Amino acid sequence: MIWLLAGLALSALGTFASILVPSSSGRLAGFLMLGASGIAVLVAATHGLFGPGEATLFGAAQSHVALRLDSVSGFFLAVVGFVAVTTGLYGLGPLSSDERRSGRAASASACAIFFATILACVANDIFLFIFAWEMLALTFYWAIAYSGTDESAARAAYLTIVVTHVAGACIVAALLVSAHAAGGFSVQGVVAAISTMASPGAGVVLILLLVGFGAKFGLVPMHVWMPHGYRAAPSVVTALMAGGALNVGFYGVTRFVVSASSIPLWVGIVAILAGSLTAFLGILWASAQRDLRSLAALSSVENGGLIMTAFGVAMVGGALHNPLLQGFAVAAAFVQIAAHAVAKSTFFLSISAIGDACETRSLDRLGGIARKHSGLAVAVLLCGMSLAALPPLAGFVGEWLIFEALMQAFRTGNVACEVTFTLAGALVALAAGTAVVTFTKVLGIGVFGAARMQKHERGAYPRSFVRSLALVLGSLAIVGVGIDASGLLQWIAAAIDGIANAPAALAMTGAFPLVQPTFSGFSSISPAGLGVSIVFFSGLFWVISRLFPRPTGRYGEVWTSGESYRPWTQYSGTGFVNPTRVIFDVALRTVRTVDQGEPFHFSSNIRPLLDLPFYRMLVRPFSTISRVVRATQSGVIAAYLSYILAFTIALLLLFPSIRRW
């Protein structure tokens, strides 16, 4: 607990140091404190995972300042702590091009975000949890509105705060109702009360919690803030938001929903369908993006949907009293959470470096990164491969486990569950295929494609040892989580088994180095073996290509359609995914505009249905009512007196008994 309190203190100190210390020194102090806080939290998380089985408590319930460190909070603290370390390291480098002024607002908001994230993951009182949740919403607003250079920051921040507060209202309503049923405000008591509620009431509370927490990680249609907010905030802060703070939503689902001992079956089915649809739509929208930050944000929507799908399977396992299915699904969700955190935080840090090196983040202008910045290209390659779920990296193991969880439909013995699992499996498969297309676009065009810009258009890349170290640590984590997935599952076994009340982690890792479902004899995989095989056959191919050289050929100038090759004739990001956009046009709703003047201009944009137009349609009736109400507020005292007189007359007519007063 001392290390945990030190992490809270250091993150708070980093916020104030960034504000009070002038010039760039404040920025350096803030990111230094962020990294130190991340290390302290990692130590505390290790104790939560490997310490005694009982939770470590701090504070008093009477004051509502009560902290709890156990295996579940230990897992989430380990994930966000690692992301804080890499983000803090990267921030110690030169000022990024998308940080405002001296960058002090970026470091201050990053430290405040991390403080609220830690507090939410260890709060043992629902009032303290709600306080941390609201603080996290305000720090997101701070990071988006005041620390970046994007011109749309004000609108993005407003959209973020509106969606987050709607989500917060759902969470407050659900937790207060549960606290009333529990007769207290402790988190454990509230979870127990949810488990004992009657079916209709429990279902409503759980759906409110899923909507509220789902807004944080982009559950459709609450995802609308993410592409705008992630694009407006500086990439170094967005790395912490997407890789770290986003996990508070997953923590809430784990702590308050999945941990409940009794869950209505239909809630799990709804969660699976919502998660799989979110995964498919998220990556489909990401594939049509030109800006790297928007693409990464919508990729987070996809991963949030995948994790929600796994949590839905865990809810079904709990509802059907199948602890092995529940434990397996929780393990799949946790591995995917870790995989997404390390890959997405490293990806956003790489996007920051790309913006500094190329002065653009548009995939229609990027190219030639691999030739000039090979180390950066390797980091982006690993991130892209992991987010596309290619073996043997972290994302592959997480998605493989989620697929395996959905393939256990026949064990449920329920037709509704079998149909739901099958539909979700199809949507997740479509999402996986689209993810490959999306990140092939990023890597093949933006990183390894030919340079599109002239040399004089390129910015000077600010090389930095600490920046490179942060990208190396993130890249190693992507490889490590994938190769040693069995070790990761053993590391977090206490958290998995504590939720399932069964030795699920042991059943998955008993045949080391294989990882298998909790049901023996179904299937298995060895990520380490896959990695060794890929390296071996790649090396063998290289040796053979050197031993048997190709016949001497004649080399000439590359040409396209009868003309000499020029960089602009290669595929653009938009052109590469055009077949995908045509096939799924119902969901993307592509709008193409042609201006045949001089010069000729063509534009192609998507208008997804579940985006801002969807919310404008919902808000329109309320805006109409608001305009009518505002019309009555004319400010004339005679009008107000007439309202009072009319109201009094109506009371006397409708309630004659008032006359006796």
Image (cartoon, grey):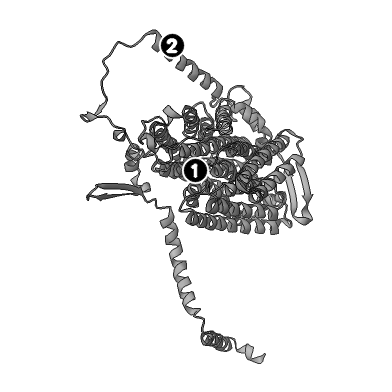
Q: Position of residue 366 (x, y in %)?
A: 39, 37
1 and 2 marks in contact (CB < 8 Å): no
Q: Quadrant of residue 482?
A: top right
Is residue 276 shown to the viewer in this render?
A: no
Instruction: Check residue 543 in the rendering and tell me which mark sits there, or answer none.
Output: 2
Q: Is residue 446 left or right of residue 275?
A: left
- Nearer to us in this view, 359 or 158: 359
Q: Position of residue 174 (x, y in %)?
A: 62, 56
Q: Is residue 454 left or right of residue 524?
A: left
Is the residue 341 above or below the residue 590 in the image? above
Within-10-Å neighbours for mark 2: few <14, some 14–19, many 20+: few
- Nearer to us in this view, 13 or 620: 13
Q: Quadrant of residue 165?
A: bottom right
Name the image quarter holding the N terminus.
Answer: top right
What's under tag 1, amino acid-wise? Ser
What's under tag 2, amino acid-wise? Val
Q: Earlier in the sequence, mark 1 or mark 2?
A: 1
Q: Residue furthest left?
A: 562
Q: Which residue is mark 1?
A: 97
Q: Position of residue 296 (x, y in %)?
A: 47, 41
Is the residue 583 above or below the residue 515 in the image? below
Within-10-Å neighbours for mark 1: few <14, some 14–19, many 20+: some
**Dot 2: what SS?**
helix
Q: Residue furthest top?
A: 547
